[in-house]
Image (spheres, grey):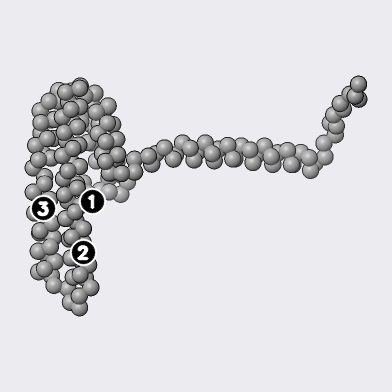
Amino acid sequence: MSAPLTYNLNFTREDRVRKHRNVFMFATMTALVTGTLAFSGCHRHRSPEQRIAHKLDHLAYHLDLKDQQKVKLGEVKDEMLRAREELSQDQQTVFDELLGKVKSEELDQDKLVQLIQRHQARMLEVAPPVVEKVAALHASLTPEQKAKAVERLEWLRERMTTHGHGARM
């Protein structure tokens, strides 16, 4: 049989400091890992399609949409993505033209204004189908859902104003 274990209860100052340092390091590492895992979930919507889907799911939840209304919301999402795709292709062309104009010796203001007007006209071309789908969804909302939508929009305006985006509103 082996000798009984004995414990040294006479810790030196260095032993106590080392023990406290180890506990502190463990707590710090645990907090960092937990924080990293918790906040990494906030950026899970990487593509525009994922962001739009997430925002519309969030909207459906807050407005308590019924199945038929969710179908109409899905149509809004599809139309928004189609319009976004069309505009992003046009935006690349506009940006390339803008770069060419900026690289030139002298900036032709009339050409720049025409470029902006052409882009705005393109935006106005793709807007009506999106607005049509939004109007169809709006018509299907109950008065309570419309009131909730107004509350959400007011909350959004307040949030954007307090976070330095007031010029956008």
Q: Is residue 114 above or below residue 137?
A: below
Which residue is denoted by mark 2 in the rendering? 96
Query: Relative to 42, is 8 on the left or the right?
Result: right
| Disc marking residue 122 | 3
Callout 1 secondary element? helix
Give residue 110's position: percent from left, percent from top.
9, 69
Q: Residue at the location (22% across, 36% down)?
A: 153
Which residue is denoted by mark 1 in the rendering? 167
| Disc marking residue 65 | none
Residue 147 seen from this side: no
Q: Is residue 127 above or below residue 59?
A: below
Residue 78 seen from this side: yes
Residue 168 vs residue 25, the one in the foreground: 25
Marks 2 and 1 sit apart, C-alpha to C-alpha, by 27 Å
Amino acid type at circle 2 is Asp
Give residue 47's position: percent from left, percent from top.
31, 44
Query: Relative to 23, is 74 on the left or the right?
Result: left
State yes or no: discs 3 and 1 in contact (Cβ < 8 Å).
Answer: no
